[in-house]
Image (cartoon, grey):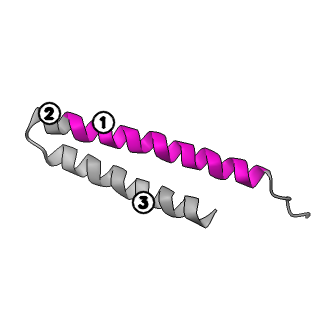
Amino acid sequence: MKDIRAHLEKLEVQIAECEMIRDLATDPKKRELFTRLAEHFRVLAAELERALADQNDGLPRPRG
């Protein structure tokens, strides 16, 4: 589970970097490319979040 969280954190950084590069780019093609990259990384991050949620569903819940 730590590996998944580490990958998720890396993707969040990559999303932020792509958005920053997109915002600074003056070439429309580069803007489009970095927009698509950020969107792709968001999809991957959502999949990892879903995997984490699925793993957490299989764990015993603490009694209180």
Between the C-alphas of marks 1 and 3, the distance is 17 Å
Q: Is residue 10 above or below residue 37?
A: below
Residue type, label 1: Arg
On screen, residue 56 versus residue 46, left or right, reads right
Relative to 30, is 53 on the left or the right?
Answer: right
Q: Position of residue 10 (x, y in %)?
A: 42, 60
Secondary structure of residue under mark 2: helix
Task: Please state which amino acid type lies under the numbered disc 3.
Answer: Lys
Determine the residue positioned at 28% across, 54% down: 17
- Residue at 8% across, 41% down: 26
| Label 3 sits on residue | 10
Work out whether 55 lies above or below 62: above
Q: CA distance from mark 1 to mark 2?
A: 11 Å
Tell which residue pokes out farthest to the left in this image: 26
Q: Main secondary structure of the magenta part?
A: helix
Residue 32, given in percent of the width and then of the height, sits at 21, 34
- Asked if the stretch drawn in magenta spans residue 44, the answer is yes
Mark 1 Cα within 10 Å, few/some/many (few <14, many 20+)?
Answer: some
Q: Secondary structure at mark 3?
A: helix
Q: Residues within 10 Å of mark 3 (few under 14, many from 20)?
A: few
Among the two numbered marks 2 and 3 on one chain, the one whose residue lies closer to the N terminus: 3
State which quarter of the image contains the N terminus: bottom right
Q: Quadrant of residue 50?
A: top right
Mark 2 to mark 3 CA distance (whole Å): 25 Å
- Label 2 sits on residue: 29
Q: Residue at x 55, y 43 (%)?
A: 47
The region drawn magenta spans 32-57
Numbered mark located on residue 44 in the image: none
Query: Helix or strand or loop: what does disc 1 sit on?
Result: helix
> What numbered label is drawn on residue 36?
1
